[in-house]
Amino acid sequence: MRICTPLVYIFAALVLSGCVPLIIGAGATTGYFSVQERGLKQSAEDVALKIALHERIGRLRDVYFKDISISTLEGDVLLTGVVAHRDEIAAIEAAAAEVKGVGKVFNEIQLKPYTFEDFGNDKAIATNLRTRLTFTGDVFTINYDLHVVKGHVYIIGLAQDNTEMETILHKASTTKGVRQVHNYIRISESPKLKTLDVQPPKKTHDATGYGIKETF
């Protein structure tokens, strides 16, 4: 029996990224991706692109497989993570842009140091935020990727409407330990990113506070 190409991409991505729950069976996996706002075909294309990007960037240095996180949305790419030198950031972005099918590259890679304490804090923030969003009735978490680096939260995905996006940004900005939220959410009815004002603390760029940063 031959499995169709989109399913191959999807299963490969599950193994590669570990970013979705373990799902047994091709039918279950197809259902998981088909209910996303972008649909099965676009999800499969984004997964295939993500795999190609991991392979291309990993060729620069092996450590990038674990140090750099990649999200793809309708051909656009969000890069996060930490590296030692500024020239590495430019080299990774250039490599990503060379991959066939890539649209815009949103480069949010930061510089080291990145301590074990930083890592622990980021994991705690990500876990807390994912839990809060999961138990929020008007948010469909299946449509989003989120990454946390040094207290900065990066969210990319497709929202059904402004209300859903507002809810996500509010939950992110009020999660303990978050310094700043970088918004790459799109409204599914529009091909362009939408802006949204979320009430931040008075010192939005203070390292001890948090705030929303519109990154487009």
Image (tube, helix red, strand yellow):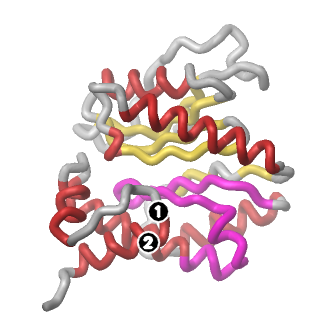
The residue segment tinted magenta is 55-83
Give the CA separation, mark 2 to mark 1: 6 Å
Q: Is residue 132 left or right of residue 105?
A: left
- Which quadrant holds the N terminus? bottom left
At x 20% / y 62%, what residue is drawn? 28
At x 26% / y 67%, what residue is drawn? 24
Depicted 26 relative to depicted 144: above or below: below
Residue 87 image-quadrant placement:
bottom right
Residue 201 image-quadrant placement:
top right
Where does the image place residue 108, in percent across and percent down from the top left? 64, 49
Say which of 152 and 185 sits in front.
152
Where does the image place residue 189, in percent across and percent down from the top left? 23, 38
Q: Is residue 169 left or right of residue 69?
A: left
At x 72% / y 77%, what residue is drawn? 61
Name the residue beneath numbered marker 1.
Answer: 18
Name the residue beneath numbered marker 2.
Answer: 15
